[in-house]
Amino acid sequence: MKKRYKTLRLCSTIFKVIGGIVAILTLLMILGICIWSTVGGRDFSRLGELGPDPVRMRVLGHMAGRVIFALMGFLYGGTIATLLFALGEGINLLLGIEENSQTMVELLRGQAGSSQASQEIEDTSSSA
């Protein structure tokens, strides 16, 4: 059976590849945040001076703020990567359903044709 919808198959592959790239970039971002927070801790502590409410913004300078910052990046990047990969798989699912439907149509047509042929054979043998 000839494969149809080559463009949709290409789009599915592109979405899955982009999802993988986003996942890798997310992991690199989290690794960068962890390195930056341990090596450049003083830079993070200055973030507390930038906000309108220094008491609340000072949380970013502490280790808990760094962990929260990394966790939020992980959740955001992981969600985007998962959605892109799921979109590619969803396209593949719809293409699989379409292929299965076409196969069933061909099988039913073949079955209907063979039953008509057997009916004609029975008709000719009973009339003889």
Image (cartoon, helix red, strand yellow):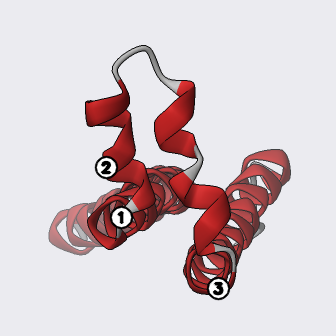
* Coordinates of residue 52 in the picture (x, y in percent): 43, 14
Quarter where residue 37 is shown: bottom right
Q: Give the residue drawn at x 23%, y 61%.
A: 123
Decide which of 2, 81 is in the foreground and name it: 81
- Quarter of the image that includes the C terminus: bottom left
Going from the N terminus, do you reach mark 2 or mark 3 first?
Answer: 3
Q: Secondary structure at mark 2?
A: helix
The label nearer to you, 2 versus 3, is: 2
Give the residue type at disc 1.
His
Above or below, 55 against 127 in this view is: above
Q: Amino acid at mark 3?
A: Ile
Q: Which residue is mark 3?
A: 35
Task: Please tell me whether mark 3 sits on a helix, a strand or a loop.
Answer: helix
**69 or 96: nearer the viewer:** 69
Compared across the picture, whether 112 is left or right of 47 comes to left
Residue 28 percent coordinates (x, y): 69, 79
Specify the farthest residue to the left.
126
Which image quarter is the N terminus in? bottom right
Query: What's under tag 2, amino acid-wise?
Result: Val
Q: Which residue is mark 2?
A: 59
| Residue 47 seen by the camera | yes
Q: Tell me whether circle 1 and circle 2 mark residues in contact (CB < 8 Å).
A: yes
Is 42 or 118 nearer to us in this picture? 42
Does any portion of residue 109 appear in the rendered image?
A: no
How many dots with numbers? 3
| Mark found first going from the N terminus, 3 or 1 | 3
Residues 22 and 60: in front is: 60
Q: Spatial distance from mark 3 to mark 1, Cα to Cα?
A: 14 Å
Few, some or many residues within 10 Å of mark 2 (<14, 14–19, 20+): some
Circle 1 sits in a helix, a strand or a loop, which is it?
loop
Of circles 3 and 1, the one toward us is: 1
| Residue named by callout 1 | 62
